[in-house]
Image (cartoon, helix red, strand yellow):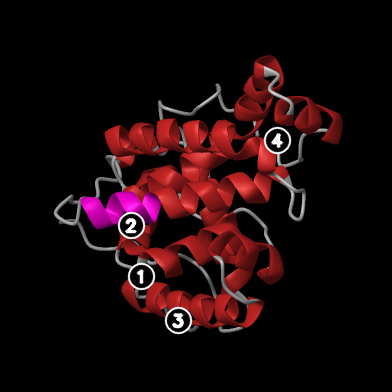
């Protein structure tokens, strides 16, 4: 196994924003299952009118919702289950569950948060069923976007190391890091997805960030 690349996260107090930037690059890295020729993911929510139509059984409206959120949901599922075939199985189950449950969607949270919650819980169910699955996060050659912080030869390896470091975290910690540091959710929104209070999200993030810093061997200076 190649030595870990020391990510240039800098001194304490400055490395969290850089970690967020790296995570954002990591989850949008080119993976064949959900890449769209490098286009940036749309982080907005779908219009309420479309959600209302889908709740009334409009299949086309539901398809629009699926298309809008699919890339983000696949990114979360892939980073949680670590296997492309399992990711596909999870997303198929998620969309069946969502379509069946949508008439009862009350709008207490955004439709995106609701879908993330279903995806997270379905991933946990999958991990419980397949405890012997070894997560595979792809070879470094798949992560080929340029980075201003590292040279081109180091960028792919560093991204691969970050994916491997994420895989060492417990699923609930990994999800907290992804939701807050990669997807930009605040603690309250992340708590809605994870089914825990904002304070619990903060605690999981603190433990996860400390573990990542240790695994990645990031220097304080």
Question: Which residue lies under the disc numbered 3?
Answer: 207
Question: Which residue lies under the disc numbered 2?
Answer: 161
Secondary structure under badge 2? helix
Span of residues in magenta: 123-129
Res 145 seen here: no
The quadrant the N terminus occupies is bottom left
Query: Counting other residues with Cα less than 10 Å from the Cα at mark 1, is it few (<14), some (14-19), or many (20 or more)?
Result: some
The chief SS type of the magenta part is helix
Residue at 62% in and 68% down:
191
Answer whether labels 2 and 1 touch (C-beta < 8 Å): yes
**Horizontal and vertical percent for residue 217?**
35, 75
> How far separated are the C-alphas under marks 2 and 4?
26 Å
Residue at 34% in and 34% down:
89
Relative to 43, 16 lies left or right = left
Answer whether labels 4 and 1 touch (C-beta < 8 Å): no
> How far separated are the C-alphas under marks 3 and 2?
19 Å
Question: Which residue lies under the disc numbered 1?
Answer: 216
**Horizontal and vertical percent for residue 171?**
38, 63
């Amino acid at each position: 196994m190649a030595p870990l690349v020391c990510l240039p996260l800098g001194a304490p107090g400055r490395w969290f924003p850089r970690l967020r930037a790296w995570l954002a690059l990591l989850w949008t890295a080119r993976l064949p299952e959900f890449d769209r020729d490098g286009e940036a993911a749309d982080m907005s929510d779908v219009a309420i009118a479309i959600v209302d139509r889908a709740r009334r059984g409009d299949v086309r409206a539901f398809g629009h919702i699926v298309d809008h959120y699919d890339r983000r949901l696949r990114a979360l599922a892939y980073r949680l289950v670590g296997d492309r075939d399992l990711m596909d199985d999870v997303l198929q189950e998620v969309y069946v569950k969502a379509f069946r449950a949508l008439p009862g969607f009350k709008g207490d949270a955004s439709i995106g948060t609701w879908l993330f919650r279903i995806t997270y819980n379905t991933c946990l169910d999958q991990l419980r069923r397949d405890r012997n699955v070894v997560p595979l996060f792809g070879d470094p050659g798949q992560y080929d976007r340029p980075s201003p912080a590292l040279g081109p030869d180091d960028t792919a390896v560093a991204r691969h190391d970050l994916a491997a470091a994420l895989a060492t975290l417990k699923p609930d910690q990994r999800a907290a890091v992804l939701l807050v540091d990669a997807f930009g959710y605040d603690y309250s929104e992340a708590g809605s997805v994870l089914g825990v209070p904002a304070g619990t999200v903060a605690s999981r993030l603190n433990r996860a960030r400390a573990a990542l810093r240790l695994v990645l061997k990031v220097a304080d200076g």
